[in-house]
Image (spheres, rainbow, N blue to C red):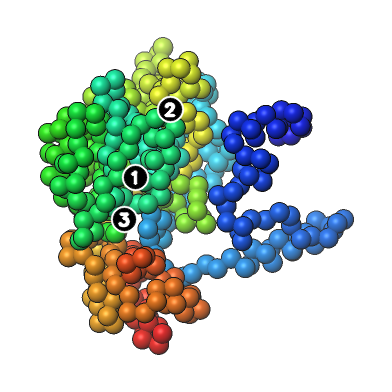
């Protein structure tokens, strides 16, 4: 953008001073030095064909595992061919924000259908679209609950660490007190700790179920505790798990948020992903992001429009409740096509397979001394102890084409999906015996 929005040295220095860094390099201080790239090692004046060959050779260094036992927020599921067929159509692939409803009916309808499916999936009343990812949705969900009397939030320490960090970042920028209650010894939410943290200043509680360690939380009791203290409950969820376990709506959650990557989006080396966000009817007008509504045109025909827009792009900045400005509609469409292709019975089957494979994996791992760290029920992820150094095991399995569970300070976090079948699990066990 440098040729369109020029900034001289004085303006650049002023911007850097405002954000508190000494140089442009300081903007990337959170990126580990070993993964930062200052320049591409390409000879000057090289031709297009040679440059492409060089880039393809670099891409070949990426490792793509065919046997994956890691989840922790991003999951490898089978994606039906129809998902890519629909989303690769250029009228959807190149479309951006549908501001002009009269020429954007197709995109608007796709978002409306996605919202409808999310409500059916979660048992909630209203959904939005265009939230960046699950962590952003969690933070935005908590901020939705703030009011003039209650301005603090409480977060269960069993949530995904990156979600917790995102919530803290949002809260810091808004001056919102955020209390994180450490996990109980069995890796579930410390219900007593949550209750002790609640007072008349707390607006909302965030709990994730299944949580980061795979444990299915007692959300019924946590909803009762939060509501009893006058606070709302924001529940994080795994969309696939809702094919098998209770929905946020059935639990009585006020807001439900989740990462939509598992619904037809590939791992993609980290994105783009999709934040799912839905709520009960009484909170609907506080939803951030983009919401599409159904109406009728002048001739009485079914039509779709953007409605209930709380984004700073659409209303006065000082009245905006959110500054989500990107467009995740293509990712939402992928999720919508995936859900339509599977249907309710297909989604339930995927959930059942993931559950069965995970429990078979847990049984086989226990034969080798990988003991479960919790006796709580789990869906498709679980944490175990580790009879050897976890990073040593991770490296040895990688050499055999297997992505291991995620090393944790306590041991390892394992995951199974419908793709992690008995053949792959048995092959993992054989490899672990060698290790």
Residue displayed at 26% across by 51% down = 182
Residue displayed at 24% across by 70% down = 372
Quarter of the view holding residue 207? top left
Quarter of the view holding residue 37? bottom right
Q: Which residue is mark 1?
A: 258
Residue displayed at 64% across by 32% down = 17
Q: CA distance from mark 3 to mark 1?
A: 12 Å
Q: Secondary structure at mark 1?
A: strand
| N-term-proximal mark, 1 vs 2 | 1
Q: Which residue is mark 2?
A: 322
Q: Position of residue 41 (x, y in %)?
A: 76, 61
Asked whether 330 or 427 is in front, the reply is 427
Q: Position of residue 83 (x, y in %)?
A: 45, 50
Q: Secondary structure at mark 2?
A: loop
Asked whether 432 or 333 is in front, the reply is 432
Q: Which residue is mark 3?
A: 212
In front: label 1 or label 2: 2
């Amino acid at each position: 953008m440098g040729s369109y929005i020029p900034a001289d040295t004085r303006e650049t220095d002023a911007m850097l001073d405002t954000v508190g860094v000494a140089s442009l390099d300081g903007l990337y201080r959170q990126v580990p030095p070993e993964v930062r790239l200052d320049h591409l090692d390409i000879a000057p004046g090289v031709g297009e064909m040679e440059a492409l060959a060089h880039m393809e050779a670099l891409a070949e260094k990426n490792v793509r595992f065919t046997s994956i036992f890691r989840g922790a927020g991003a999951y490898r599921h089978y994606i039906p061919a129809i998902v890519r067929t629909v989303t690769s159509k250029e009228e959807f692939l190149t479309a951006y924000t549908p501001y002009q409803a009269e020429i954007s009916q197709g995109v608007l309808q796709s978002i409306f259908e996605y919202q409808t499916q999310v409500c059916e999936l979660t048992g909630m009343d209203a959904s939005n679209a265009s939230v960046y990812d699950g962590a952003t949705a969690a933070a935005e969900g908590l901020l939705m609950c703030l009011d003039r009397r209650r301005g603090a939030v409480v977060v269960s320490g069993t949530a995904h660490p990156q979600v917790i960090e995102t919530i803290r970042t949002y809260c810091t920028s808004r001056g919102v007190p955020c209390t994180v209650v450490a996990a109980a010894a069995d890796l579930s939410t410390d219900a007593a700790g949550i209750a002790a943290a609640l007072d008349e200043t707390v607006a909302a509680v965030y709990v994730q179920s299944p949580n980061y360690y795979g444990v299915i939380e007692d959300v019924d009791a946590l909803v009762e505790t939060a509501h009893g203290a006058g606070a709302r409950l924001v529940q994080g969820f795994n969309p696939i798990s809702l094919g098998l376990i209770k929905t946020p709506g059935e639990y009585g959650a006020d807001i439900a948020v989740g990462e939509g990557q598992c619904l037809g989006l590939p791992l993609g080396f980290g994105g783009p992903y999709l934040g799912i966000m839905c709520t009960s009817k009484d909170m609907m007008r506080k939803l951030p992001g983009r919401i599409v509504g159904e109406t009728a045109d002048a001739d009485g025909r079914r039509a779709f429009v953007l409605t209930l827009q709380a984004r700073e792009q659409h209303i006065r900045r000082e009245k905006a409740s959110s500054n989500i400005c990107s467009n995740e509609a293509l990712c939402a469409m992928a999720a919508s096509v995936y859900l339509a292709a599977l249907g309710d019975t297909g989604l339930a089957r995927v959930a059942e397979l993931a559950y069965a494979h995970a429990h078979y994996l847990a049984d086989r791992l226990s034969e080798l001394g990988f003991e479960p760290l919790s006796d709580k029920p789990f869906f498709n992820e679980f944490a175990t102890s580790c009879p050897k150094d976890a990073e040593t095991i991770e490296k040895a399995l990688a050499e055999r084409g297997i992505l291991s569970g995620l090393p944790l300070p306590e041991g390892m976090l394992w995951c199974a999906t419908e793709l992690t079948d008995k053949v792959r699990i048995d092959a993992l066990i054989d490899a672990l015996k060698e290790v």
